[in-house]
Amino acid sequence: MFAFVLEIGTEELPARFLANAEAELGQRFGAAMAEKGIEFSGLSVCSTPRRLALYIERVAGQSTMREEVITGPPLKAAYDVGGRPTPAVEGFARSQGVAVEALFNLDTEKGVYLAVRKSLGGEPALGILAAICPAVIAALPFPKRMHWGSDPFTFARPIRWILAMLGDQTVPFCLGVLQSGASTCGHRVHGPGPFTLANASSYFTVLREQGKVSCSAEERLKIITERGDRLGEDKQGRILWKESLLEEVSGLCEHPVALMGGFDPSFLEVPREVLLTSMESHQKSFGVESKDGRLLPYFLTVLNIAPQDEGEVRRGWERVLRARLEDARFFWKTDLETGFDAWLEALNSVIYLAPLGSMGDKSRRIESLCAWIAGNIAVPGGEKPIAAAAAADAALAGRLCKADLVSAMVKEFDTLQGVMGGIYALRAGKSAAAARAIAEQYLPAGPDSPVPSSLCGAILSMADKADTLVGCFGLGMIPTGAADPYALRRAALGIARILEEKGLRLDVSALFSAALAAYGDIRWKSEPDQFMHRLNDFFASRLKNYFTGKGAETLLVEAVLGADSADVKGAAGRLAALAEFARADDFGQAVLTFKRAANIIRKQGQEEGQAPLDGLYERALFQDEAEAALADEIERVAPVFNELWDKEAYGELFGLLRRLRPFVDAFFDQVMVMCKEEDLRRNRLNLLQALVSRLGRLADFSALQM
C-alpha cells in the first residue's frame, strides 16, 4: 500500500468556491477509484486559496484481481453439421483473445451458450491514476470557469502547477499545457518554493514546515479563533465571531495571523448594527464587545502574512476602517436630519413593479393589510381581533416599513434595510412594537432563518409577503422550475412558517383575497378568479413541501391538506394527530371504511345534472335498521365533534372514528346505497354526506392509499 497525493495549484480561488470544490473532488475521486477496482483507505481533501489537494493514506499497488464470465453465441449456432466451429464462434474467441478450445458451455435461463472465463484486474495503480486524475480535475464543477492564453482547458482560476505522486513515483499525465510533477509551492512570502517531495507521505510536513501553509480549513479556523480570543481577553472583551465570515476569512488565507486594531470611541454613537456591518462587509473584520454586551472600539482582522512591523500594518487597517466609519457616521447624521416624512414622500417616486405602482403605493397597501390581519388573526389562547393598541402598532409599522429604502444609510448598506427602519422609528419616537416589527419585516429570510419574534413583526412580514405574492401572480410572474426571481416560494414558505411556529390562526386564502382588494383597480394579466386559484394551489404545494421537509409522510400530508390548506396551524395539528392515528393497529381498516364513504360522495358530486348533496336526510325514508343506527350515532357524535373541534383536540377527533366505524361498516354491509329508487338513493347519499362533511374537516380520506 502506498500514499497518494494530488494537488492542483492555482491562482487565488474565491473563498466561496472551496467547500463545494473539496466535496466534489473527494466524491468524484473516490467513486472513480472504486469503479476501477483500486482498494484504498484514508481519503481526505483540503484546500487553501491557492490549492485543492486530495490525500489518500493507503492505495493498493494494482487493481483487484477478479474473474468474469463472458457469454458468447448460443450452443445451437456454434457448430456446423460437421462439428466445426462457426464464424460466430471463431470471431467471439478472437475478440476475447483466447482459443476456441478455451470456450465452455454455460447453462442460462435462455438456454446453453458458449462462454469464456477471463481473469481481470491486476493493472498497475500508477497507470489507472494517470487516467483518473485529469478526468476528475476536468469534471470539477464551478460557478464560473475560464481559460487563459491559447490553452483551451478551463478551470475556476489559472492552474500553475500539478503535484501527483503515488508513493515515491510521479503519476504522469497532462492537463492542457501542464505536466504533472513531484513539486509543490508554499506561501507566496514565507515559503514560496517550489519544494520537491521525496514521497507522497511527506506532503503535509513539507507544506507546513517549508511552505508555511496550513492546508486544513479546520486548522486555520482553530488558529484564528484561539489567537482572536486571547486578543479579545487582553481588551477585557470577547470577539463577535460570525460563522459565515469566519469561514470566508479562513478561505482567504494560507498562513492566518489574527490582528487586533482599534478606532476612535466617538464612532460608538453610530448604531452597533452599522458599525458591525461596516467592519464585516467592507473590511472582513470582527467586532469586539464587553462582557456586559457593549460594543468596544476595537476590531479583529485576519492577515495572510506574519508582518515584520505589526504596528505599521495595524495603523494601515485602522486608517481604512476609519474612512468607512466616517462615511457611516455621515449617513447616520444625514438620516437623522431627514426623517420619515421626507422618506415617505420619496417612496412615491420609487417604482415597485411598473403595473403595481410605487413603493409608496405598496407601503399603503401593507398598512391596510396589516390592519385587516390584526382584525382577523387569532393568537394562542386569545380571541380575535387582537388588542386595539397592537393593531394600531401593526398598521403604523406597515406604513413606515419601506421608508428606510430611500435613506442614505440603506443606500450604502443595503443589508441593513428594515434594521435601520426600526432604529430610526425608535429615534423618531414611534412605538417600540412598531419599530421592532419594521426591523423584523423581512424574516424569515430562508428555511433556516428565524421567524419574527413579535406579533406585530409577524403581521407585517405576512402582509408584505402576501402583497408580493398576489401582485406577481396577477402579472403572471409565477415561478417555473428553478426560476423564481421574486422569491415567491420563499414568501409562501415564510407565511406558513410564521403561522405554524408562532401558533397563529389565519385563513390564508382570505389573506390573499384581502391583499387583492388592497390593489384596487389594477389591470391584471388574467382574471382574478384564475390567478387567485393558482395562488392558493401554489401555497398549498409549498405547505406540502414544508411539512414533508420536516419528515411527515407524503400521503398523510396530502390527506390533511386535501381537507384544508388555508389554516396552517390547524393543518399542522391535524397532521400530528393523523400521524399518531396512523401508528394504531386499526388505522388501515378505519381508513378503508371512511375512504369508501368519501369516494361515493366524490363520485356523486362529479355526475352531471345532480343537485349538490346537503347532508339533510329524512328518517321516514329509512328502510333498514342500519340506516337509523348510523343516523342516531352521527347525531350523538355531532355535538361532541363540534366541541372537540373548537378545542383543537384533533387526536380525540380521530378517536371518534373508532366509535363511528362499526355503524358505518354495518350500513355498507346491509344497505344498498346506489339503489334504483331515486328518493331512497339520494336520502342514503345525504346520510353519508352528513358523515363525510364532518370527517372531511379532519382529512381527505380518499387521498390515503391502503
Image (cartoon, grey):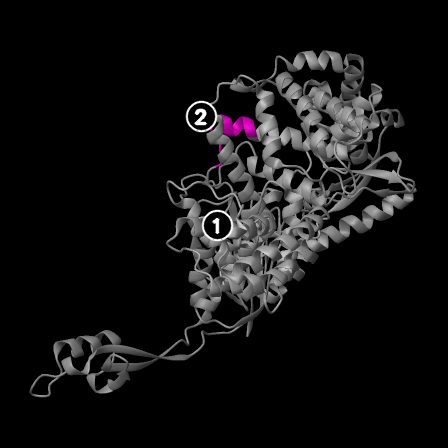
Residue 513 locus on image (x, y percent): 58, 29
Residue 626 locus on image (x, y percent): 53, 62
| In-image side of 366 versus 53 (left or right) | right
Residue 158 locus on image (x, y percent): 51, 43
Q: CA distance from mark 1 to mark 2?
A: 41 Å
Q: Secondary structure at mark 1?
A: helix
- Measured along the vertical axis of the image, is residue 684 above or below residue 334? below
Residues 90 and 533: in front is: 533
Q: Amino acid at mark 2?
A: Ser
Of discs 1 and 2, which sits in the foreground?
1
Residues 531 and 652: in front is: 652
What residue is disc 2 on?
Answer: 526
| In-image side of 410 versus 144 (left or right) | right
- Measured along the vertical axis of the image, is residue 649 above or below residue 362? below
Residues 49 and 114: in front is: 114
Q: What residue is at 7 percent from the left and 86 percent from the top?
A: 81
Magenta residues? 470-479
Residue 683: which numbered mark, if any?
A: 1
Quadrant for the N terminus, please.
bottom right
Q: What residue is at 71 percent from the left and 15 percent from the top?
A: 343
Q: What residue is at 18 percent from the left and 83 percent from the top?
A: 75
Residue 518: which numbered mark, if any?
A: none
Image quadrant assignment for residue 258: top right
Bin the neighbour count of mark 2 within 10 Å (Cα to Cα): few under 14, some 14-19, many 20 and up.
Answer: few
Bin the neighbour count of mark 1 within 10 Å (Cα to Cα): few under 14, some 14-19, many 20 and up.
Answer: many
| In-image side of 535 versus 135 (left or right) | right
- Measured along the vertical axis of the image, is residue 178 above or below residue 383? below
